[in-house]
Amino acid sequence: MSMRGSGENLWEDFVREFEKEQAAEGESAAAAEQARQPERRRSGRRLLLPVAAALLVVAGAAAYALRPSDQAPAAAPAASDAPAPAPASATAMTAAASPSAFPLSVFPGQVQGYTLVAGVARTSCTGPDTVASTLAGLITQGHGCLGVDLALYKDAEGNQYNVALFTMADQGDSVHLVTFLGSHPESFQVAVHVPPTDSGLRRLPADRGRVQDFAAHGHGVLVGSAQWSDGRTADLDKLSERLSPLTEAVLTNVPA
């Protein structure tokens, strides 16, 4: 794990800005709570704020829809902005020490009752068709990302599992990202795969009944998410238990 120097301060400042923004939003929500408390009680846990945008992107036969569920902090660049260039010295070190982006082959076709439905590899990790603006900002605050692989799995019951594997240029960034994402498990930062028309799977709302799992291994950051086949919001703990074996199986294929 490399030392980050002044970059560590930038990262901490970014996270502090995010936490202050979330606290401010929480205070505003608390002020309106009395007026709408009966409605909130009817909502399932982990339901998020109304969706701010819906984007559909087609890449060959694979499609991803990103429906960001959070509001980006003021300090974060917009996801559509070009990533800030790294200093020349950092770029040189990255070229000498970083691995190539992980290939799609890290996703097994069949594993423990899960079947791979579709997958796509991208060289850009920060586009609006891949991540929400908060995660894009975190990536550009660090040493950058070499590529991302995204896959959609299903089980025998038709439940849907999305797995995204980011190849970070610096292992230290992997730890930072997973720490941050794990502390905000109901903020969906990664796009979900739109099921192919011949898959027999339903197109589910990306902000409904969705659970997540995060892990870091070497240069890899893995973000997994799952939804019941009918999009229900009940039994989310059981859904999380079904997601874990899949993400663990993918991690075994990620080199250190």
Image (cartoon, grey):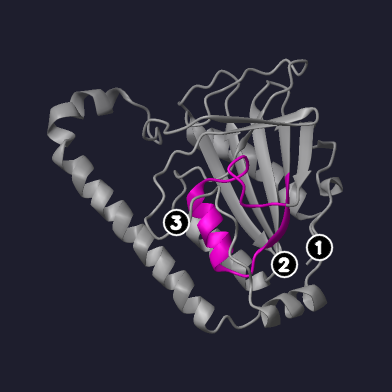
Q: Please, is residue 51 above or below residue 215 in the view?
A: above
Kind of element beneath mark 3: loop
Using the rendered view, name the quadrant where residue 198 is placed: top right
Task: Name the residue beneath numbered marker 1.
Answer: 255
Kindly report the distance in space between the C-alpha atoms of the residues bearing marks 2 and 1.
Answer: 7 Å
Image coordinates of residue 91 in percent, x first then y, are 71, 75
Q: Please, is residue 236 above or below residue 183 in the view?
A: above
- The circle drawn on residue 216 is none
Dots 3, 2 in contact, CB < 8 A: no
Residue type (three-letter) at the residue carrying disc 2: Gly
Report the residue at 50% width, 49% height from top.
133
Residue type (three-letter) at the residue carrying disc 3: Ser
Report the residue at 75% width, 79% height from top.
92
Q: Report if residue 177 lies within the magenta region.
A: no
| Of 55 and 196, the residue lying toward us | 55
Q: Earlier in the sequence, mark 3 or mark 1?
A: 3
Using the rendered view, name the quadrant where residue 153 is placed: top right
Q: Report if residue 146 lies within the magenta region.
A: yes
Image coordinates of residue 74 in percent, x first then y, are 37, 56
Q: Earlier in the sequence, mark 2 or mark 1?
A: 2
Kindly report the distance in space between the C-alpha atoms of the residues bearing marks 3 and 1.
Answer: 25 Å
Q: Please, is residue 107 above or below residue 63 in the view?
A: below
- The circle drawn on residue 218 is 2
Image coordinates of residue 161 in percent, x first then y, are 66, 34
Q: Residues within 10 Å of mark 3 (few under 14, many from 20)?
A: few
Q: Quadrant of the N terminus?
A: bottom right
Residue stretch rendered in magenta on the structure: 124-149
Task: Name the residue beneath numbered marker 3.
Answer: 183
Dots 3, 1 in contact, CB < 8 A: no
197 with respect to 38 (left or right): right
Dots 2, 1 in contact, CB < 8 A: yes
Q: Residues within 10 Å of mark 2 (few under 14, many from 20)?
A: some
